Amino acid sequence: MNTKTISAIIVVIVLIALAYFFLGVKRTVPETATTGTSTEATTTIKGKMTASALAGARDPKMAGTWQATDDAKATRTFSMDGTVTDRYAGDASATDTGTWEVVDPTKEVIGVPAESVAGMTVLRMNFEHSGAFFYTVLSLTDNGLELSYLGRGNTLSYTKVK
């Protein structure tokens, strides 16, 4: 092969790579990406929603009361209006109410490097008495919820009770 042929092949490969990169990123309107009040256009990269796209969203599966699997007296209630309430049966002083939402970890100080939670859903909960906490959602089903408390790394497991 001569140098002109090799140069032409390299140019074609570079053009294909550039086309793949730029055509792989597209803007779409997801079917159910809501912020509680409105549906927004979000950026999808190769079929996955980005952290920025999810920021402010609230998954309807989260709504309801969840009982801790390791302590039946502890419950956490998520409302679609963004309210979260922690309760401990038998101790009214342990009740704490606040807000919850999905956040973009690249735009928040979450206590761990943002790249360590890349591709994960990160929740911020702001409680009236105890302050702000960040969690990653490890799993969410109709009947089960697992959160990892960022900074500590411990897993909180819940079963839906209503």
Image: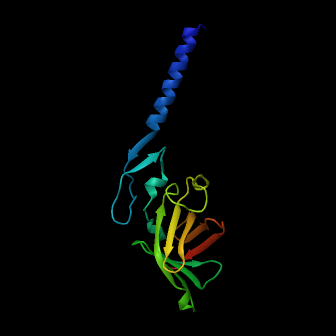
- Nearer to us in this view, 63 or 143: 63
Extreme residue toward the top, this view: 2
Residue 15 is situated, as x and y percent measured from the top left of the image, at 48, 25
In the rendered image, is residue 9 in sight?
A: yes
- Nearer to us in this view, 119 or 159: 119
Q: Is residue 148 left or right of residue 15?
A: right
User: In percent of the image, x 57 and y 13: which residue is there?
Assistant: 6
Extreme residue toward the left, this view: 38
Report which quarter residue 2 is drawn in: top right
> Image quadrant for the N terminus?
top right
- Nearer to us in this view, 138 or 7: 7
User: In percent of the image, x 47 and y 70: which residue is there?
Assistant: 100
In the rendered image, is residue 84 in sight?
A: no
Residue 147 is situated, as x and y percent measured from the top left of the image, at 59, 68
Report which quarter residue 138 is drawn in: bottom right
Q: Is residue 84 left or right of residue 69?
A: left
Q: Is residue 93 left or right of residue 59?
A: right
Depicted 5 relative to depicted 63: above or below? above
Count of marks placed on residues: 0
Residue 37 is situated, as x and y percent measured from the top left of the image, at 34, 65
